[in-house]
Amino acid sequence: MRFTIIISLLILVSSSYGKSCDNEYVKVKIWKFKSTIPPAKDLKLEENTTLLLPNSSSPILCCNLLIFIFSHPDHFEHREAIRESWGSYERVKNNTVCKRFFVGITNNEDIQSKLNDEYYEYNDIVQVNCTESDATTKSLQMLKVIYLYYQNCTEFILKTIDSVYINLEPIWNILPKLPHLFLAGNLQVEEIATKCTEKCSDKFYPRYLLSSLWLMSLDTAIKLFKTAATTPYFEIEDVYITGYLAEKLSINRTDFPMFTYIENKINPCILKKIVISQNMTPNDIMMVHEKLTDVNLNCTKTICNLPTPQVNPNFSDDVKCFNLDTFKTLILPKNFCRKSSNLLIIIASATKNNLRRDAIRETWGNLRSERKAQKYFLLGNDNFKIQELILKESYFYQDIIQVDFEDTKYNLTLKSIVMLKLVTTFCKQNVTYLVKTDDDSYINVNYLEWVLMKREPKRVLVGILYKNSPRRTNTIDKWYIPKNIYKKKHYPNYLSGAGYVMSMDVANLLYQKSFEEMLYVLEDVFITGMLAKAVNIKPCTFHGYEMEQRPKKIDWPKCSFSSFVISHPRTSIDMNDVDDLVKLAQSSNCKKCYHLPQC
């Protein structure tokens, strides 16, 4: 029986051999753009354009996730590497997985003969009568195969190519969060329509997903195929399928950071967090698989950050990973979190900012022993020339924590993750609230402690709240972020890194969630925005949290500085001015105001 099926398929191959894709289509009249691009093509369902198709005796023909891997007929080594690596899994997280290599035609009889043998041996090849140069038509043929043969055999479709390594495990973490009709991948936004700038009425292509990987529901695939019959053909495959067709159907296109495309030869702990690594040779695929399946690989306490936009906008070579279990702490005071405290204040400071640290010690950081609050400065290690001075400062004040990483503005996110690690490791039992601030901020500790003691210390995250804040698009802006690193126009609600407060349960949630995400370069956006949103914690503020005016000793009523949490004076002189006004308010027994949080 099996021999008969193969013979019939080979006859079909020889009879259809070398046909042009254009012969299988007819023109349609609908074209809503001003263009002279070739008109739409209509797939004729009554014509069988599939040359090779796995027979129904395959035990994994039906599965939860069906993977189509686009491959050239002569890519025998790529297909073999995938079969022996990530393509060997038939079950991931209790879900069944099956793969199909999707190839076009070849005019080389030796290659076709070898391909036929490969098909007979592995039963995982689909060959369609279309040239490899026509990517759009090949993708339409895939949708047609799904429509004709797989409607009752799968739930989800993953389309990819044969020069990538796919990490299937993270996919099952996001599927429950997606709507019924969806397309997910690496989303491109506001891409200039270079292929038809003079011919199309649209300046930009619609939002679309890069062709290296698409994840979609079965219903999405079927609707895309049916809609193609009445939608003008476009030569750019990903723009046409996931852009024009999806836009016409109002299908949700979702971007996920874990779908980031990263080049090969990188830390395997990064690949544990993402779905796709591309531009791989067969040897690369096998090498990565060997590393990822190494029983000694430990990524449970590993965090990885995207590179800075100024260094490499394509973020392929500058991704760095840090294992927090082996992270070297250079200085940690013996008394760190040894006593019970209402407030633990961690002040992010640069090694060179000793004058700022002294100003804090002399003003708001001069905490009396009877007060249940303690403060520590958190430093990196970027200036070996003054390391001896740091050691002396630490010995004298016993309030410096130093960790071994380069202390730059692009490592502020890493610095805050280290803070969360230290706090969740040493302070869970002895601390009620964590306060994170900078060394150019003034914290009204007395008022903050008074306010927080009126609240239950659970699910608290308060600070200076930014709502619907736009991504900075000006390249000369200090915090410029290109859209290939963050594609949305606005950030989730977040708190200013100048000073925010969280209860210890929130600190633990944020720390644990950080291992599932790629670190974002903007510390406050990542910690209090992205991570907080991921664990369903709303950042809040309250009236009077920040004293916005630049303080002066003159012309201020004595009670003006009685009810605020943070002032951002920036200089040591300003710090002293604020401190004098706060002490004046305290000595005058000014009434404190309490305001309900606003989220």
Image: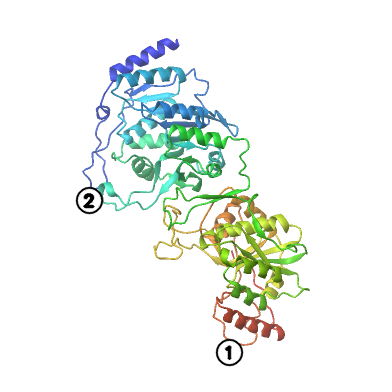
Question: Residue 384: percent from the left, percent from the top?
Answer: 57, 63
Viewer-nearest of discs 2 and 1: 1
Q: What residue is rendered at 50% in x and 20% in y?
A: 58
Q: Is residue 209 above or below residue 380?
A: above
Quarter occupied by the N terminus: top left
Q: Secondary structure at mark 1?
A: loop
Q: What residue is rendered at 67% in x and 57% in y?
A: 422
First-in-chain label (2 vs 1) = 2
Q: Secondary structure at mark 2?
A: loop
Question: Residue 62: percent from the left, percent from the top?
Answer: 51, 25
Residue 298 position by quadrant: top right
Question: Residue 482: percent from the left, percent from the top?
Answer: 42, 57
Q: Is residue 550 visible?
A: yes
Mark 1, residue position? 554
Are there few (<14), some (14-19), or many (20+) residues within 10 Å of tag 1? few
Q: Is residue 397 left or right of residue 119?
A: right
Q: Which mark is residue 198?
A: 2
Quarter occupied by the C terminus: bottom right
Residue type (three-letter) at the residue carrying disc 1: Ile
Q: What residue is rendered at 46% in x and 63% in y?
A: 479
Residue type (three-letter) at the residue carrying disc 2: Glu
- Asked whether 73 or 24 is in front, the reply is 73
- Asked whether 38 or 356 is in front, the reply is 356
Q: Which mark is residue 184?
A: none
